Image (tube, helix red, strand yellow):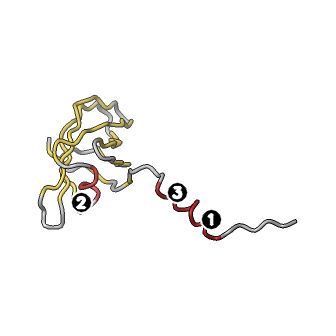
Amino acid sequence: MKKRFNSAFVILILILFVLSGISEALIRDGSIPGKSGLSFSSIRYSFRTLNVTIRNRTKYNVNFGGSMIFLDKNYKVIARAELLNAKIKRHSSRKYNAFFTYGSGHEAESAKYLEWEF
């Protein structure tokens, strides 16, 4: 006996999988202006926190920390995340957990530009 699935049942299952996903997104990669040899990648943000990987490609240990400022298309600040100071060893990377002091991950998702403040 062959069983057939109802198409409404399959659509319902797909909707449940989509809605049960984690509310994080991957946005940008690039170099950090003003800090030679440092770059960032894998920015993932949720509503209250932000995760970012900072890479140090120099031969020196570096202390790094500051603010990430998310701007809209009119260069208006829509979100701000603070990274606490920590040491990044030479030729390595470090994952930072930042927190939003202004806005949230939802606003940062719509940002067109990203600036760094040290």
Select label 2 or label 1 by which is in front. Answer: 1
Does residue 61 sit above or below 80 in this rendering? above
Outermost residue, right direction? 1
Q: Which residue is mark 2?
A: 111
Q: Camera-side residue: 94 or 2? A: 2
Q: Amino acid type of disc 1?
A: Val
Does residue 42 sit above or below 14 in this rendering? above
Q: Camera-side residue: 82 or 101? A: 101
Query: Which of marks 2 and 3 precedes in the sequence?
Result: 3
Q: CA distance from mark 2 to mark 1?
A: 35 Å
| Label 2 SS | loop
Q: Which mark is residue 10?
A: 1
Q: CA distance from mark 1 to mark 3?
A: 10 Å
Q: Position of residue 7 (x, y in %)?
A: 64, 70
Q: Which residue is mark 3?
A: 16
Quarter holding the N terminus?
bottom right
Quarter holding the C terminus?
top left
Query: Which of marks 3 and 1 precedes in the sequence?
Result: 1
Q: Amino acid type of disc 3?
A: Leu
Q: Amino acid type of disc 2?
A: Ala
Q: CA distance from mark 3 to mark 2?
A: 28 Å
| Residue under the image location 21 percent in, 36 percent down | 65
Residue 76 found in image quarter: bottom left
Disc 1 crowd, CA 10 A, few/some/many (<14, 14-19, 20+): few
| Residue under the image location 18 percent in, 50 percent down | 69
Residue 56 found in image quarter: top left
Disc 3 crowd, CA 10 A, few/some/many (<14, 14-19, 20+): few
